Every structure is written in structure tokens, then in C-alpha cells.
């Protein structure tokens, strides 16, 4: 176990060293703004939610973001946040919801990794149940960019360094969907269904 951990550390260190020797020039990536995401996704109809406060946007360091509420025909609400970074070379890196949600008063109740079907592939995403007082929400989130969907934060950082060296690209983003847990419905299944419908629409805004 110790030997395996040492190999992982060595690989990450080597990748980081390699990345520091490449040019800081970011390859240009064509993409559409997040605002062009459809307002109808699957059986959900979306509307703009309240914009994030300026100081929050500054803290996140995003170049583009979207904050919407989608509601299904049966009245199931799903909140969507997606933030995009054109470059993560200058210190503006993705903030994990594991750090942000507790700061907003939510505490994790359970966590796991699930897989969603997208374009014939099974992609991993994080699933959390969080609680504040008596309220609970199911949260799915993942990292997306440079042709990948990644659940693990540390794997995403390692791939970021590798792609900086190999592709001259550090663009990417975070996608988070969440819905309240209420009696009589399976919030986890409904959030997963929305996320599955959402994934194909993200390729042109998070390439």
C-alpha cells in the first residue's frame, strides 16, 4: 500500500514538473456561452435564478457561469449551476462543492459515486446528500472539459497538469445539479435523470 502511494505521488510530482516547463500560452478553444444552454432539457423547463453576488463571482474566479432553476411537468425542481474557466494557469481554479456547501451551512449526510449513461458511455459523477436543519438535498456534481467528465477532484487536477503539458489547455468547469428531498418521491433518481438529459448539451459550452 505504501509503495503504491509512493508511485502515485511520484507520478503526480513528475506531471507537475513537466507542466511547469511548458509555455504558459493557452490554446484557443472555440465554445458557446453557457447562456446558450437550452431552457427545455428533457421534461424540465428552465428559468434564470437569482444571479450570484459580485463578491461570490470574484471568489469563484469564473469566466462564465449559469444559475438556473428547472422544473419538471410534475413540479419537481432541480437547481443547475455551471461555472467555466477558460484557463486555470493563473490561480483561478475550480472550487469543489465539498468546500463551498459547508460554508453555506449545509453538512454532508452521505456521499458516493454513481454513473450516468451519456452517448453510449458510463460517466462518473459525485452524489451527495446534504442537510441544513430539517432540509435535505440531493446533489450531483462533476468536472468537465477537454473532452472528459471526471468525478474525482484529485484525478481532475492530475489530468489538468497533464493536459497543460500535452495540449496547452487548462480550460474546464464544474457542473452541479441539486434538488430537495421531499416525501413521496425519489429525489436521487430525478436528479440523475435531469443530469443524464443535461450531459449531451454541455459539449459545446464546456469543450
Image (tube, rainbow, N blue to C red):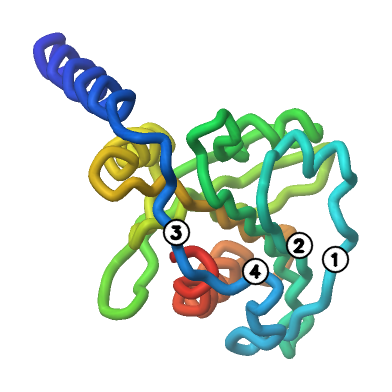
Residue in the foreground of this view, choosing between 192 and 96: 96
Badge 4: residue crowd in 10 Å (few <14, some 14–19, many ≥20):
some
Q: CA distance from mark 1 to mark 4?
A: 14 Å
Q: Residue 204's x, y, as percent?
A: 49, 74
Residue topped by disc 3: 28
Residue behind mark 4: 34
Residue beneath disc 1: 49
Looking at the image, which is closer to me, 187 or 42?
Answer: 42
Residue 39 visible within the image: yes
Q: Earlier in the sequence, mark 1 or mark 4?
A: 4
- Sequence order check, earlier mark of 2 and 4: 4
Q: Of tags 3 and 1, which is closer to the observer?
A: 3
Q: Is the residue under label 2 in contact with that under label 1 (CB below 8 Å)? A: yes
Check disc 1 and report its element: helix, strand or loop. Answer: loop
Depth check: give the residue in front, 186 or 54: 54
Residue under the image location 39 percent in, 67 percent down: 116
Quadrant housing residue 190: bottom right
Amino acid at each position: 500500500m505504501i509503495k503504491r502511494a509512493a508511485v502515485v505521488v511520484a507520478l503526480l510530482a513528475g506531471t507537475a514538473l513537466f507542466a511547469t516547463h511548458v509555455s504558459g500560452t493557452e490554446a484557443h478553444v472555440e465554445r458557446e456561452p453557457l447562456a446558450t444552454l437550452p431552457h427545455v432539457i428533457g421534461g424540465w423547463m428552465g428559468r434564470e435564478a437569482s444571479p450570484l453576488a459580485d463578491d461570490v463571482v470574484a471568489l469563484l474566479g469564473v469566466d462564465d457561469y449559469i444559475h438556473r432553476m428547472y422544473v419538471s411537468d410534475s413540479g419537481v425542481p432541480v437547481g443547475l449551476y455551471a461555472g467555466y474557466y477558460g484557463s486555470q494557469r493563473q490561480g483561478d481554479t475550480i472550487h469543489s462543492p465539498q468546500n463551498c456547501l459547508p460554508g453555506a451551512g449545509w453538512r454532508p449526510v452521505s456521499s458516493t459515486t454513481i454513473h450516468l449513461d451519456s452517448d453510449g458511455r458510463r460517466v462518473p459523477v459525485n452524489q451527495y446528500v446534504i442537510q441544513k436543519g430539517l432540509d435535505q438535498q440531493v446533489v450531483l456534481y462533476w468536472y468537465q472539459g477537454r473532452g472528459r467528465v471526471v468525478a474525482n477532484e484529485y484525478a481532475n487536477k492530475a489530468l489538468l497538469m497533464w493536459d497543460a503539458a500535452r495540449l496547452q489547455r487548462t480550460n474546464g468547469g464544474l457542473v452541479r445539479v441539486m434538488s430537495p428531498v421531499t416525501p413521496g418521491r425519489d429525489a436521487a433518481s430525478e436528479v440523475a435523470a435531469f443530469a443524464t438529459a443535461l450531459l449531451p448539451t454541455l459539449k459545446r459550452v464546456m469543450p
